[in-house]
Amino acid sequence: MSPLYQRIAIVGAGVTGVLTAHALHRAGFRAIRLFDSASSFTAAAPSIQCGPLILPCHGSRLLHRLGLLALIPKTARNDIVKIRSTTTAGHTISSYDPVQLVRDAPHRPRDSSIPTIACHGRDLYIALTRALPKHHDGVEVKFQHTFKELKQNEGNESEKGEKGAMLACFDSIDGPVESGVDLLIADDGLHSPIRSRYLQQGGGEVRSLPGMYVRGVVAADSIAGGGGVSVPHSNELIEVFGAGLKFCYCFIDDGRHIGWLASVSSNYQDALQDPQTRPERMAKLFSSFPAPVPALLSSTLPFSIDTCPSEDLRPPSTFHSADGRVVLVGDAAHGCAQELWQNVALGMEDACMLSELLSKHAPPEAVRLYSQLRAPRIKYALQLTRSEAEQALRPSKMMASLRDMAMSMMPPKAQLDAIAQLLQYDALREAEQA
């Protein structure tokens, strides 16, 4: 472990921030402070706790290696063995087994049998926060602390560090707080103030996507019409492509609940802004989609429906400050479209790779290597997810028909090569070989 990175502050207690604390602790760090402006974990990450979560296998493998995957009971998750894309007419566009794609890799990752999983985002987040090491074990959590600035310690040597050391300054309910830090890790969201202030870089601008995302969770035994819902296979994730509309659904536990995510082009999104009328208008928009889509929508209670961010980042050119004292993770580094479910998995890669590099390399080499290794990976993921979003949200029927025709005529290998590059990636192996 690098002696110059003893004290680490993480700003943001979202999934990536919490997982970064886990990964740093596992790598041997014992002076970790996790700060968030919210009053509790429940308030710190409301978005992920409001709906279904698909964690692709390159993310679930990392959870497994950290010993955290087992914290999600098998009754509270669903192992996905097939992802199938169809048109509204029921024609199959593509179908693949994520684990098989990984096993076919020239350099197969470790734990290649670990599957893509579906669960409620709340269950994953609660499991991670409850398992955090306690203060006496090296991880201290500070709520109601809003990051203000970094500055140098101008006083005498103290618990904050020697004169000239860096101080992270926060506003808290008890007044200003200063914390001596050797490294500040920013997981402060897509519109990261820390990224804007401390990283002089190209890229990193927030961009709008051509539509919006709506998601929900419904109890399988409450589907309209009675008798539950017929899903072709309980371990399938199904995507249905329409004109300016896309609908994904699967079980997110052992058969009790179904989670869904709808992509809606900008042509329709104005009609969905009002939460009170959103369920009814969603049902009308997707009324021509095959069963069980209309029944899923009409049976989802209004309070179980939520919207997701409809923005992404232009790929940043670097992920650390010039002095190597600030580094980005999570949405602050790569907020992306909901297509291909990459946000949480990429954040897990950040946490594991950064922790491994910090344990092996002295600053600023560790964060320089982190930026060097993450840049091509994140650029690829952001470009691919944005391209997928633009494809999914083609608003005209003619353009949608051309898209479906092109996808169905494309050789299966060509269709899956891009996805395979995402799933086969091994962040820890990259860091270990650096």
Image (tube, grey):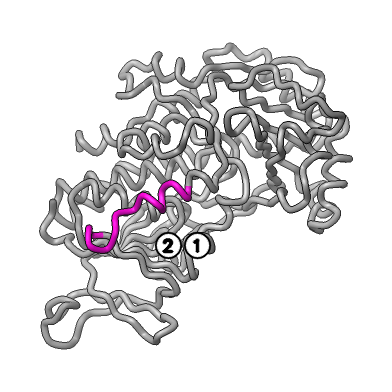
Q: Is residue 402 visible?
A: yes
Taking the image as shown, residue 88 lies to the left or right of residue 3, namely: right
Residue nearer the viewer, 26 or 378:
26
First in sequence: mark 1 or mark 2? Answer: 2
Q: Residue at x 29, y 80 (%)?
A: 178
Q: Are marks 1 and 2 in contact (CB under 8 Å)?
A: yes
Return the x and y of residue 259 as percentages of the image width and height.
Answer: 66, 37
- The residue beneath circle 2 is 12
Return the x and y of residue 253 as percentages of the image width and height.
Answer: 58, 32
Q: Residue at x 82, y 43 (%)?
A: 282
Residues drawn in magenta: 125-138
Q: CA distance from mark 1 to mark 2?
A: 8 Å
What number of labels is visible? 2
- Vertical order, 55 against 366 (above or below): above
Taking the image as shown, residue 209 lies to the left or right of residue 423, namely: right
At numbered mark 2, what does the secondary structure look like: helix, strand or loop? loop
Q: Is residue 322 visible?
A: no
Taking the image as shown, residue 378 lies to the left or right of residue 78, namely: left
Name the residue type under label 1.
Answer: Ala
Q: Residue at x 13, y 61 (%)?
A: 4
Q: Please identify the dominant SS of the magenta region.
A: helix
- The residue beneath circle 1 is 44
Residue nearer the viewer, 366 or 353:
353
Return the x and y of residue 340 as percentages of the image width and height.
Answer: 56, 34
